Amino acid sequence: MNPKYLSLMVAAALSAAAMNANASGYRFGSQSVSGQGTADSNTAEAADASTIFANPAGLSRLEGTQISGGVTAVVPHSTYDDQGSRRYANIGATGGAAHQDDYAPSAVAAPSLYVSHKLNDQWAVGFGTFVPYGAKLDYDNNWAGRYALTSIDLKSVTLNPSMSFKLNEQHSFGFGIDAEFMKAKLGQGVDVPGSIMFLSANAANPAIAARRAALLQAIVANGGNPAALAAAKDGHATMDGKDWGVGFNLGYMFNLSKDTRFGLSYRSSIHHKLKGDAVWDFSTVTTDAKVNAVLQASSRKSNSPALVDIKTPETLSASIFSQVDDKLAVMADLTWSRHSRMEDLHIQFVGTGEGDEVIRQQWKNTMRASLGMNYKLNDAWLLRAGVAIDESPVDKASLRHPALPDSDRKQISFGANWKVTANSSIDLAYSYLKFDDASSTYQNQCSTLAGPGTCTGNGETTIGTWRTHMSLIGVAYNYKF
């Protein structure tokens, strides 16, 4: 048997591909509440210290010392309808729950904190910390796609010290270091019943018949009862791990006039060497513990470390901001993400002699376009709005995995800044995101006839459709010294 193993590192790698709020993939909400209010089209505005994330060159525009602390809540609604998921070798349906509507959390939230300080007319420094990506799904252990994934919980945080240099009234430059931490836990079903079905259904094949006979002999030799196989249930695997990675980000701003400026910003690829532990549980496969022990041994799955090397995609953004008059400002942002770095992922099982788990990604590069505006209602209130369209890096249904049921989406946002005192203000933002229906025909291509150590996987196919929309609600407090 070659039961499928989708490791912690797969989920983390998929999620890490979304480096910021301007990228598709498993991104987490927004890193700036003021930016969220314009659908993140204000990257050339430098409205507050959160410019550290959007474009560090904007630090040169901030006076004194400024603090901006916020939190963004993501309220998702997602459903899944199975359309015939199959076990490996197409020997039968996976069974289990065909409709899922409670696997996404009711709400999750992430904080952000930015501090800026102007040293002199040319130099400014800052520090930001934010959540770049995250995932939390719990399908349960009996849904139709359980052999691909049962649950994932991914958390991350970035520490981003930054600085800017103002060359003259037209040109400003910014630089930052990105120290990125991720921590994840993942669960997945093990198709023991399907393995037994395959051995029985192909008994006419001499090689498979020999494997089946060897399994029965081993059970008897271990004191187990082969009849217990008739009622075999799934096994289960859980994984957890963590890792730090380091990258950098750059920014440039050009002032065409005192009211109009252009911006360029770049966030580098980050290399992660993800390490975790896999724990396999065959204890509930049958009621005969001796049979379970033989099944786990024959599967060649034992608790072990696991490892995968990935490089996350870099992003490049171009933006414009123009203060049309005393009340109205307009802005736009175009972001390119090099998701094509995410080719097939090879997960290694350290010290086991097992072949790699190969996750077919072959992601495409994406573009995100957003437009926004500010309107000064009065001295106390500034209103914001924005729209965006965002491509998914998932190229087609055959490459869409349950850990990342991503698709193209459209976004509309509204926001406001309330000036409480001369030195303090509060930002509010609401966004609605509508995802295109996301269909999957993803198949793990590891053959059950592959020789020992060749590959890991059972070749099951997940066939179904996800339908998703979500709301983002943000609030931030800003203070100037």
Image: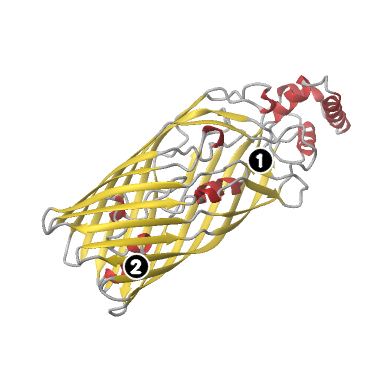
Q: Which residue is mark 2?
A: 57
What is the x, y in percent for residue 119?
31, 79
What is the x, y in percent for residue 130?
41, 58
* Amino acid residing under circle 1: Tyr
Quarter containing the C terminus: bottom left
When the figure is inspected, residue 3 is found, relative to residue 7, above or below; the finding is above
Residue 50 quadrant: bottom left
Q: Residue furthest bottom?
A: 120
* Amino acid residing under circle 2: Ala
Crowd band around label 2 with a 10 angstrom C-alpha radius: few (<14), some (14–19), many (20+): many
Q: Nearer the viewer, residue 464 or 137?
A: 464
What is the x, y in percent for residue 96?
57, 25
Residue 21 seen in the figure: no
**Residue placed at 44% from the left, 48% from the top?**
27
Q: Which residue is mark 1?
A: 5
When the figure is inspected, residue 338 is found, relative to residue 256, above or below; the finding is above
Quarter containing the N terminus: top right
What is the x, y in percent for residue 3?
70, 35
